[in-house]
Amino acid sequence: MRIGVLTSGGDCPGLNAVIRSVVHRAVVDHGDEVIGFHDGWKGLLEGDHRTLDLDAVAGILATGGTILGSSRVQPAQLRDGVERAKGHVADLGLDAVIPIGGEGTLKAARLLSDAGLPIVGVPKTIDNDIASTDVTFGFDTAVGVATEALDRLKTTAESHQRVLIVEVMGRHTGWIALHSGMAAGAHAIVVPERPFDIDELTEVVGRRFEAGKRFAIVVVAEGAKPREGSMAFETGATDVYGHERFAGVARQLSDELERRLGKEARPVILGHVQRGGTPTAYDRVLATRFGWHAVEAAHRGDFGKMTALRGTDITLVPLAEAVERLKTVPQERYTEVECVL
Amino acid sequence: MRIGVLTSGGDCPGLNAVIRSVVHRAVVDHGDEVIGFHDGWKGLLEGDHRTLDLDAVAGILATGGTILGSSRVQPAQLRDGVERAKGHVADLGLDAVIPIGGEGTLKAARLLSDAGLPIVGVPKTIDNDIASTDVTFGFDTAVGVATEALDRLKTTAESHQRVLIVEVMGRHTGWIALHSGMAAGAHAIVVPERPFDIDELTEVVGRRFEAGKRFAIVVVAEGAKPREGSMAFETGATDVYGHERFAGVARQLSDELERRLGKEARPVILGHVQRGGTPTAYDRVLATRFGWHAVEAAHRGDFGKMTALRGTDITLVPLAEAVERLKTVPQERYTEVECVL
Amino acid sequence: MRIGVLTSGGDCPGLNAVIRSVVHRAVVDHGDEVIGFHDGWKGLLEGDHRTLDLDAVAGILATGGTILGSSRVQPAQLRDGVERAKGHVADLGLDAVIPIGGEGTLKAARLLSDAGLPIVGVPKTIDNDIASTDVTFGFDTAVGVATEALDRLKTTAESHQRVLIVEVMGRHTGWIALHSGMAAGAHAIVVPERPFDIDELTEVVGRRFEAGKRFAIVVVAEGAKPREGSMAFETGATDVYGHERFAGVARQLSDELERRLGKEARPVILGHVQRGGTPTAYDRVLATRFGWHAVEAAHRGDFGKMTALRGTDITLVPLAEAVERLKTVPQERYTEVECVL
Amino acid sequence: MRIGVLTSGGDCPGLNAVIRSVVHRAVVDHGDEVIGFHDGWKGLLEGDHRTLDLDAVAGILATGGTILGSSRVQPAQLRDGVERAKGHVADLGLDAVIPIGGEGTLKAARLLSDAGLPIVGVPKTIDNDIASTDVTFGFDTAVGVATEALDRLKTTAESHQRVLIVEVMGRHTGWIALHSGMAAGAHAIVVPERPFDIDELTEVVGRRFEAGKRFAIVVVAEGAKPREGSMAFETGATDVYGHERFAGVARQLSDELERRLGKEARPVILGHVQRGGTPTAYDRVLATRFGWHAVEAAHRGDFGKMTALRGTDITLVPLAEAVERLKTVPQERYTEVECVL
């Protein structure tokens, strides 16, 4: 069998572990050949690739990033390129293509699958926003990095009687905010799913100071926004892909809380450190299992699906189902955490 | 409501997070009173306890160990003490008792539950050997610590052309060995569930050197043993509780492999570092959720059960079911990892 | 002997280790009494204090922040309060006062010393800008945190063909930028001591891309500024103490480099995580030794000085000498690092 | 200029950083050629080498181990091979040889230097036992790893009322034990420089329990031994190089303390994790500076010396002076730490 693999979308710890696992399972156990496309869908559209043997994946299990490179491709570009992609797959004699990526990548995967390509997707997202799987690799690492930062910030906030507003990733969902906030014992958690009321947030934080506490930690997802009319709020510009640029909610909240509470407040924006570097053991194991099962699915001819974690099992679910909706934090998870606004 | 809580058995990162969560949910949200028994069942048998308010659990979310202390109690002692325990529960006016512990603790919990005490158990084990729950807190931290050590050991082994035999925890099950071995890319994984054949292990490791590699990492669970007749093997003495003392398999394997392969081999025994210190974010979230749901179960009168993770949900399962059998690594998980013997 | 201790200025990992060490040495070995003033000089001016015995410092060796709290006091306030401070010292019967702090704190210490108070200072700064000592505690932790972040960011930058501009602390000196940049292999390091030329920086980064590299990491100290006339640059507003507020150089550099290079560039501002949390072993040892030697100096009556590291020895140097000038990065250290602008 | 480089002796975090720095400084700044000998002196004796260009050292700054491999060579072998080594150096047209290694390596370096080879040594040791330099790279990482383990073990010991005897590296000197013990707040530190009295140790630990404490942590260097007649003590066998094999002091101390105190005691042997993996930022900076200055010394013709840290400066000291004696912990350092036996 000949298998193509590519990584697409934003960086995510564990991408290399999937690539390595695909190569190990395919080459060692099945005697397959594996080729890797460069820079995501772009490599498939342009036929830009290289052979991946065991040496090519030596030493990458614990490394961040992706040895194949990644890029973001506009949906329109991909739609226009379907025939070209099919041509390259035919020319290279590929029996299966394994794209590893997030929501956008999986939508593209579905498009190509519907067009007849033999696709087995592997979901990837630090945001944990892909439905149909309990979780994907990358999320655990991102939460771990954010939690470690929160642990560090707590002592500083306490010693200096401050409110720290810590912005974590999450454009549309509050999973990283929820989990890192729970893990670090944040005093308020603000998520995109629930536009916040600035009066309520001020009160929650203010009550701590009234009770004699010396500090407060507020975790806010980058995509969080105030309830309409709640406070003046400047939204970000859009970037070249038409995506909204975020980078402002922590700063704006910090200024507003400082003004309202009369306490020193400071924003901390964790940024890209949440996306990079060594994956946790959890993510490496999950990524490795996903790679293994993607190869098995390819050998079974189980196409048009993606790998998914359900409990402790890896299963295959239809791409169509997986990309139907974004997985947001369900109501019952908020109930568990008193401090979610 | 008045709730008693205790921690019993070996140390496990996340115990304090459960205690804190129980207190937060019970005291803040329900207006309950919580008391903590000292040193596990011993505290319940002797009525040794203290009140746990919010101040008592401040700052413990990220700390290892247990502020309540722990101990191991002999089953016979506990059986003889059932009436005494019931007496203390009645005297203290407790409406629920939440024991946090591993297999032994949960068996004891079942005994007391059958005797009529209102018990909600919370499972704890770094070994991941408790059935009826996908996983418990402590395991992720233990795997993380073991993986980080393996990452470090790899570079040393490679630079010096060595075989390193790394002994991780796991008396009866190979979960830590399997996950840390997968996460770190070990070259052989030896687990208690499958008595190993020394010839086969020698061959697996030997093949690497024949292929020109300069080193090999073997991960072995402390409870692993050779297949009968496979090699001379000295088993450990028993400790005061009649439990077998382990500490030898890595050393014995190292000597045997050095002799057979003519390559320098060294044992590394990770030991108690796997049990202590700051829990990972994953374990803190899980522990916190377990504590929250245990309090809810108590308020519903849902006794004789323990909290369990199923997929992404926390559910309650009968203690009877949970302690029926040890959760060993299932066959299909070995299939995924070529290097498990 | 009766000794007062206080911590003043910005947060710094290792403050608690000094406090603990002072108490251990003084109470256990000398039979002294130690009292701690709350929130820095403010506590001394207001006589706000508590007794510090062994229990008070149990478990704080590895914790960030300061159990005594800190604050920034205006020089004028302190000057006006000298007599009040002397009064409190007399009323409390103190034979020595040990202030732990940075440049501002040590200047205040000198003022009070000149006014006749028995002072032994302990220098503290994550910025490494205090003269007369090889280094102080806090710096190693800050560099470690920044380096770990840079390690993570590298893989992300590479996978996505980006320029990352990473802002680390350092208002007046480039020590953290220099050391973390060297440790992580940054491609350009921009420091306050040397106003940068944007043309030169653009060329350094551009050459990497011309040579076929896919990414670049630029480390910039928060206080860095462009050479006059080099580029439009917006300077920060001042805060309530009249100090300049920084938070912009990475963002401004990022925008400018993106425009000039036509490559995606992103700012990452590490912020307060560099100040908080568990100190490294290096900082704990240094902080512990400083505390020990400060007590010894007090017992010798060696006042008006501060502890200092010279090679591997702890010595005492006059406060006057220590606060004379800020310790900037010397020319020969730039020579060692080709990538410093 | 043509420069040869090699790494010899036990593994040490930072070796790769030195190699990278030598190549960067020599190739980029001086236009030199650099070749690396494989597996230490063995490579020089056998002329086994490869060219090191910028690509060869890409991505190794933060990795443990050594890309050149290492080995231990018997002094006699080296003495017999001097002429061969000189022949290879001449054949390869080398103007300088930079061996990176510990005490044994530096002694060999001196031998070859006396025989006329143009040598600039770079000292390496996790043990910190090389005289004439304040410290070398590797030590900070080893202390960091040991301290992190001790931090973890503390919570476990406390929860379970145990004495933990933690064995760290240090065959002839107690530097790692001293620094990690200070950093983690150990209750007793046992070092090779001072044969311990078991009665005294028992008393120190016993006093803690009498004072109501629940646990004790004893840090012991692997080379520590009891004072003659103090207790029965089994010494290790010798390995193939005639070196003593250590691995027993923690176990023997644990058994003896358990027996004498009637408290549960457990040995933990940290082992090779102290030697491997990512170096700390401190060690990367020091290793990088050593590499840079070694190249400069070669260009100045400053041979027969090794790089050394003195305060914050890198200097060159005669090899003869550096290998004259082992750097043991001086008396005044014990004085600072009440718990050193």
Image (cartoon, coloured by chain):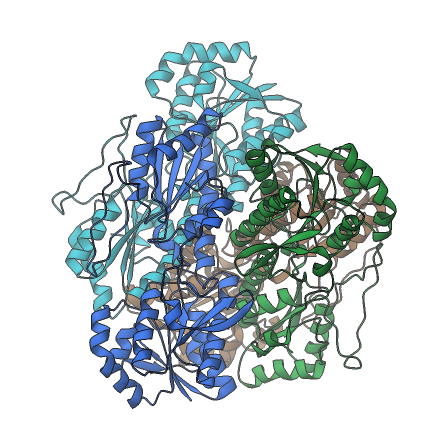
Chain colours: A blue, B green, C cyan, D brown
Identify the residue at horizontal 53%, vertical 64% (top origin). B151
Identify the residue at horizontal 55%, vertical 26% (top origin). C297
Tell me residue D169's x, y (percent): 63, 56
When the figure is inspected, residue B6 is found, relative to residue D167, above or below; the finding is: above
Examine the rendering and report whether any part of residue C268 can be seen: yes
Residue A75 left/right relative to C43:
left
Residue B103 left/right relative to C56:
right
Tell me residue C13's x, y (percent): 47, 39
Tell me residue B260's x, y (percent): 70, 82
- B13 or D208, which is in the foreground? B13
When the figure is inspected, residue C96 is found, relative to residue C280, above or below; the finding is: above
Examine the rendering and report whether any part of residue D53 can be seen: no
Residue A1 left/right relative to B303:
left
Q: Quadrant of the N terminus of chain A?
A: bottom left
When the figure is inspected, residue A101 is found, relative to residue C78, above or below; the finding is: below
- C315 or B233, which is in the foreground? B233
Identify the residue at horizontal 35%, vertical 55% (top origin). A272
- C267 or B120, which is in the foreground? B120
When the figure is inspected, residue D111 is found, relative to residue D199, above or below; the finding is: below
Q: Quadrant of residue B236?
A: bottom right
- D140 or D315, which is in the foreground? D140
Tell me residue D22's x, y (percent): 38, 64
The residue at the far left in this view is: C229
Residue D200 left/right relative to A127:
right
The number of numbered discs placed on residues in the rendered structure image is 0
Q: Quadrant of the C terminus of chain A?
A: top left
